[in-house]
Amino acid sequence: MTDKAAPIVNLQQDQPAAFAHVYEGPSGTWIVQDDMDSRGGMFTNRKAAMKFVDGEFGPETKIISSAPATDAIDTDSPIPSNQQIVPHTRHRYEVHDGQVTWSKIADGSAQGDVFDGEISSKGWDEAAHAVADAANMEGSWAAAAKLLIEQSGQDAGKSSKTKSKGSNGKDQKDNTFSLASEGEGQPQNEVFEHLESNVQSYARAFPRIFNKAVGTTIWDKDGRPYIDFLAGAGSLNFGHNNPAIKSSLIEYMQSDGITHGLDFHTVAKEKFLTAMDEIILKPRGLDYVIQFTGPTGTNAVEAALKIARKVTGNTNIISFTNGFHGVSMGALSITGNETLRAAAGVPLGGATSMPYDRYMGEDVDTISYLERVLDDPSSGIDAPAAIILEIIQGEGGLNMARVEWLQSLQALCNKREIPLIVDDIQAGCGRSGTFFSFEEAGLKPDIVTLSKSLSGYGLPFSVVLIRRDLDQWSPGEHNGTFRGNNPAFITSARMLELYWKDGKFENELKKKSAHLRKRLLAMVEQHPDDLIDVKGRGFMIGVRCVDPDQAAKVTRNAFTEGLIIERCGPRDEVVKCMMPLTTTMEEMDQGLDILERVFEGMFSREAWDKNVHDISDSESLSGCWEVAAQLLITHADQTPESGTKGKTG
């Protein structure tokens, strides 16, 4: 008996066994149904069955028990068609060196995992569970299924990509869980592969060529729809091609309105400034001047840092752990992500990182720590030109500062006359549930940066809101060719008029946000071993996974199911919901249903059972349970996902 013939549980689904033997070989004890061959066919007699056993597993095997029990076996006699197996009352699965042994327990009890040992699909379920547990696969049935998927085509001599029949008789793909490796899915058109820079990222995560988008749905060039829970990384708060906003843009363009105007005074700019002041600023008691910067969020941040340094005469900017503010040089210096910082290619100075709220734990007051180092002339921290933060850290993991922490920070800044900058580029324009993310805490920042959804239509547009007395720019001191995006002025003014003139839209956001949070909390409660908690608020909310690799699989599997959703966090461990604010309750539930199914498919034992049945029933495995078991057994200890974290089962 060779290593190839590891102990095997031979189980045939939905076919009664006429006769069975327990065999013992060099690798251990195992069971074979003598009336079935590996192709699901029937042996005509025991001699044929024994010939199969000898040829498949070697002549060293011997019978140690049989059912029905007999001392003399007539190998030439036919197997009675009405002979039923005498079931062993209990069986035990043992795993050694990645191999499983299914043995009878005479007294019906044993130490360790004991399962119902009927010749049935249930027996296969339990054997597979035992292997996954013993292989320390972190309780991930998806990981075990992945091994089957990867090996089924090779071991059965067929491609695992072939279509097959599942246990329900329907065509399906072998790679049931769609567990593609990171980066799978190359550009579908050689134009992109040949001409576009390697720096592309979202195109790798969502490898399709997209062609059309309306509201919360985006279609690829083949016409397949996807529910969009990414919304241009928060740039499409009011949906793709919002018809009311689009009509104002079309009307403006058809009237030959100014498209490019540097910082000229234009009718379009006047319309935006008036709407912003009357609808947003005055009702909130905010008195800001509005600086138009280059059209990206990072340019707005650069301008904010420059004006703070100019006004105070200091150079040090205090930022916070896990913050993200952009990838131009000044913004990178106050961004936490090490990969992005390394891409600068030079040392990043002029900034000091301090611990964000709860970064050191629930009971550590990081504002007191900040105050202490500012008080100490030997702390090594230079006097700051400004303190900048996100109220909700969009890329840092949806960390959300508490109201009392934010108020303490505002008080510290007021006392020391340190300009407080709120980066509301991602959390602003309603994504947090209010127009500004700082409204809940009652803050009045000295400087605010806005971009992303400010245009209301996904057009490039950024501004800096500056406390009036801090507006000490000299003419042209900070400029940019595209600081006057007039079409965006038109769409932004229309967005403000449509959604923010009264409290109706904000009230709708509260209802939908509550529903979104409730559903995500239910998913966490359903999978406590794999999901930690819900992070963030409003339409900037997500679920933190125990394993970042599993979070990556969640987003990949969701995409195969028709949901576009991304991750964030220091290790990309948070699955992040960023759908448009205009998403209907029905659309939201459709997307959340997909997310819920993906979690079930990866973390639920029931889902594992169903999928291993489908894999084993597939064309490549010919409905043979023992082949599937062998694949799992042989390769369980080779999985890269093996480790000591998490729980099994």
Image: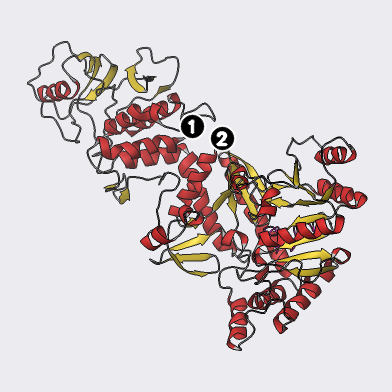
Residue 63 against residue 635 in the figure, above or below: above
Label 1 SS: loop
User: What type is the residue that disc 2 sits on?
Assistant: Asp
Q: Is residue 148 magenta?
A: no
Res. 35 image quadrant: top left
The one nearer the camera, 540 or 528, is 540
Alpha-carbon distance for marks 1 and 2? 9 Å
Q: Position of residue 58 (x, y in %)?
A: 17, 19
The picture quadrant where one finds residue 533 is: top right
Going by the numbered disc 1, the residue's amino acid type is Gly
Whether residue 342 is situated above or below residue 111 in the rendered picture: below
Q: Which residues are magenta?
A: 425-439
Furthest residue to the left?
76
The N terminus, quarter of image: top left
Q: Nearer the viewer, residue 470 or 19?
A: 470
Q: Residue 436, position in %: x, y?
A: 75, 61
Q: In the image, is 308 to the left or to the right of 66? A: right
Res 190 → quadrant: bottom left
Q: Which mark is residue 139?
A: 1
Q: Position of residue 108 (x, y in %)?
A: 39, 15
Residue at the spot of label 2:
529
